[in-house]
Amino acid sequence: MADVLKRVPVREQDAKERAANFEEVCYGYNKEEAMEEAARCINCKNAKCITGCPVAINIPGFIAQVKEGNIEEAYKVIGESSALPAICGRVCPQESQCECKCIRGIKGDPVSIGKLERFVADYALEHDIKPAKADKTNGHKVAVIGSGPSGLTCAGDLAKLGYEVTVFEALHELGGVLVYGIPEFRLPKEKVVKKEIEKVKELGVKFETNVVIGKSTTIDQLMEEEDFEAVFIGSGAGLPMFMGIPGETANGVFSANEYLTRSNLMKAFDDNYDTPIAAGKKVAVVGGGNVAMDAARTALRLGAEVHIVYRRSEAELPARVEEVHHAKEEGVIFDLLTNPKEIHVDENGWVKGMTVIKMELGEPDASGRRRPVEIPGSEYEIELDTVIMSLGTSPNPLIASTTKGLETNRRKCIVAEEENGQTSKAAVFAGGDAVTGAATVILAMGAGKAGAKGIHELLSEK
Amino acid sequence: MYKILKAEKLAANIYLMDVEAPRVAKHCEPGQFVIVKMDEKGERIPLTICDYDREAGIVTIVFQPVGASTTKMTNLKAGDAFRDFTGPLGRPSEFVEEDVEELKKKKFLFVAGGVGAAPVYPQVKWLKEHGIDVDVIVGSKTKDLLILEKEMEAVAGNYYPCTDDGTYGHAGMVTTMVDELVEKGNKYDVCVAIGPMIMMKFTCLTTKKHDIPTIVSMNPIMVDGTGMCGACRVIVGGEVKFACVDGPEFDGHLVDFDNAMKRQQMYKTQEGRAMLKVQEGDTHHGGCGNCGGEN
Ligand SMILES: Cc1cc2nc3c(=O)[nH]c(=O)nc-3n(C[C@H](O)[C@H](O)[C@H](O)COP(=O)(O)OP(=O)(O)OC[C@H]3O[C@@H](n4cnc5c(N)ncnc54)[C@H](O)[C@@H]3O)c2cc1C
Ligand SMILES: Cc1cc2nc3c(=O)[nH]c(=O)nc-3n(C[C@H](O)[C@H](O)[C@H](O)COP(=O)(O)OP(=O)(O)OC[C@H]3O[C@@H](n4cnc5c(N)ncnc54)[C@H](O)[C@@H]3O)c2cc1C
Ligand code: SF4
Ligand code: FES
């Protein structure tokens, strides 16, 4: 009999091997393993895990179906609240959401809710289980801007209700951060992302790529000239920040967005694709979030020695615990409590090194985390050829600046109601990173659902 | 897919294409650019919009093969299509938003270098359509490489072709032509210089000497063209700008050209390798260490 205090371990690709390829790291559960893990759930009446889930998935409900081996039923339960379970099962920070609330966690491991969700969703993808399509359209036209998780979810929900939805995407591929940001080894593109998007297409949603709203056309024009009755803005927070330190425009200094876009969207890691990437031999990634981990592990796979340079300590790393753990296993070196001061440039304009300074933690700041302060005189130099800046992103001002009457806040985020996505402009809704600033897939998905609800409330009254 | 309606070789190393892209054609203005992608595996290549026909939904591009991707593009014929064609990107030229009556009081000088004649053309044409005649200098290495002569002559007030080797028009670089016009007593309020970075750099040094405010169109390496990656960083007046959203046109007297030129070389050796692959097909495998392809 297995120890009920321990979760069923999940199979993973060997750390040494995977450090040199782009195949998915985690293999996930098979049906037997999933059923065994599901049996650990005690089906709490007042299930705490649900309160930790931003979209309140009926967690004990779907796990109970897995326990019985009714995977299709389990999928339906998840589908009531989540549109992209194969993705969320892989990228949600479960340890700080549902799993940290799980009763089992008080004495032992919490139930592996994320891995179970992923198993159910993958099963549905493999067995071609699909959400039901609307019988007929209701004749109302809705435009969705951006094909990230918020836009996809909003479009899917509206299509199920019979709306004629067109998604406009600036890039040449669909998926937003799911295709240009999060790497293949964490979120397979063909096997998972493309298939989830296929499902949205099958609901009747139309997609137009290469349309930059604010440039190729505007929201006002979509409504006035193309007869869209409502618009949902899910344009994300894609603008990278830099530190403003000397040497930052040198060759070999990239934003994480550029580095990851070259590798993921343009597939520069694959020799069959034309876009180049300067992989680097010794790379520093500045930052400690998911984006930093992804950039670091990408550089590692392209053959570099990689250092994460982060100004706080391990406890404050904002990345998912699993990613930090995987990064360490693969050989990423963590230079914690360290902050860059200056990048050194050689005579050809390339990075040759960086001066960093040691930090210590002081009083807690507004975010509740202890503020890092420099230790005077502790500067030292490291030799490098590549620096990847992963300091966070902010929303692109393009849409706000080209849409009459659309209000934004100090952080350039679009102002929208949480429960229905309504913005300051009539019939225009928004959600996801464009509203919250860089956040998570599940929150973006939840906002897409709220936006669909808001649009439905508006248009069904017409 | 974005269909190519016309593909023409303008000169030994310069190609023109008319592409069906109704959304771009409807909204573009002089000074803006598009990003094209040939196929699934291709790079995203920024190219300035050279002309447009709003009714027919057509955008004209002119390009020069300099690396692997632009070289592959020369194989495309009428009837073929680009997989992706995004735009219009970047800001329109400043004058597009200015009051036409004010513009009429200004004297413009356009300076184009090589393929730069293509992006200069729609600006000169726009001004002509709004009743403003401008002086245009177009330079090239030699007579055979001058492009869009007929078109440019038709819309320019005064047209001054120059060739480095003296085979046609004024003999010498565009900068010597600028000097000559100013010395003849021409007064200019604005100069717009577009061409290779090195040509823009020297044109700016010349116009600075004559105290003529100058606008240049920067062509750094780009990826998305929407402000998402920062590959297109240029230093203008000591500040970092993203050319794809803040530009591509900037005050040339404030641009750090030396930094920009170094940044443009970032992928030089890698591209050299990609280029060999295109030219030699399967015979090139790289990594032999003898061809300089490594490092
Ligand atoms: C590298 C990386 C790793 C991450 N890892 C995780 C993780 O492990 N777990 C997690 O929960 N979250 C993670 N995130 C965050 C998560 O991906 C985002 O919060 C989420 O994708 C936001 O979704 P969205 O729909 O709001 O926007 P996005 O996914 O950003 O999509 C916006 C889309 O809109 C398009 N667009 C923008 N402007 C326009 C315009 N003007 N016209 C037309 N289209 C436009 C964009 O091209 C893009 O496709 C990560 C983010 C990154 C960058
Ligand atoms: C806003 C913008 C507008 C542009 N408009 C045009 C246009 O209208 N017509 C056109 O022909 N090109 C234009 N360019 C340049 C064009 O995008 C590049 O030539 C092209 O991307 C090169 O792609 P490649 O892969 O073939 O060559 P790459 O592999 O990128 O480069 C090969 C070699 O050429 C050099 N190189 C790269 N870019 C340039 C450049 N811009 N000028 C000179 N040398 C360069 C590199 O240093 C490298 O050594 C524009 C660029 C920008 C950013
Ligand atoms: S808290 Fe844990 S044990 Fe209780 S229902 Fe949720 S997953 Fe099951
Ligand atoms: S090209 Fe990516 S930000 Fe300008």
Image (cartoon, rainbow, N blue to C red):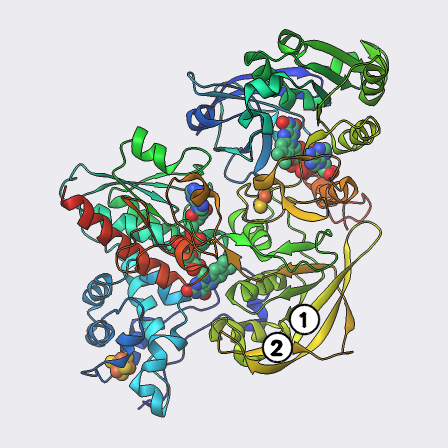
Q: Identify which amino acid the numbered label 1 is placed on.
A: Asn
Q: How many marks?
A: 2
Q: Earlier in the sequence, mark 2 or mark 1?
A: 1
Q: Residue at x 41, y 38 (%)?
A: A209
Q: Are marks 2 and 1 in contact (CB under 8 Å)?
A: yes
Front in this rendered view, residue B106 or B287: B106
Instruction: Determine whether the residue tagged by mark 1 lies in a helix, strand or loop.
Output: strand
Left or right side of A386 for A192? left
Alpha carbon distance from label 2 to label 1: 9 Å
Front in this rendered view, residue B283 or A283: A283
Query: Can the viewer see residue A316 in this picture?
Result: yes
Q: Identify which amino acid the numbered label 2 is placed on.
A: Pro
Instruction: Determine whether the residue tagged by mark 2 lies in a helix, strand or loop.
Output: strand
State which chain disc 1 sits on.
A
State which chain disc 2 sits on.
A
The answer as to whether the residues below labels 2 and 1 share one chain is: yes
In the picture shown, does residue A431 fall above or below B5?
below
Q: Please give the residue where the numbered disc 1 appears in the rendered image.
A: A339
Query: Can the viewer see residue A184 in this picture?
Result: no
Rendering quarter of residue B61: top right
Q: Please give the residue where the numbered disc 2 appears in the rendered image.
A: A372
Where is residue A397 drawn, in percent x and y?
A: 48, 47
Where is residue A279 drawn, in percent x and y?
A: 66, 55
In the picture shown, does residue B293 fall above or below A224?
below
Q: What is the crowding at mark 2: few (fewer than 14 residues within 10 Å), some, or many (at least 20)? A: many
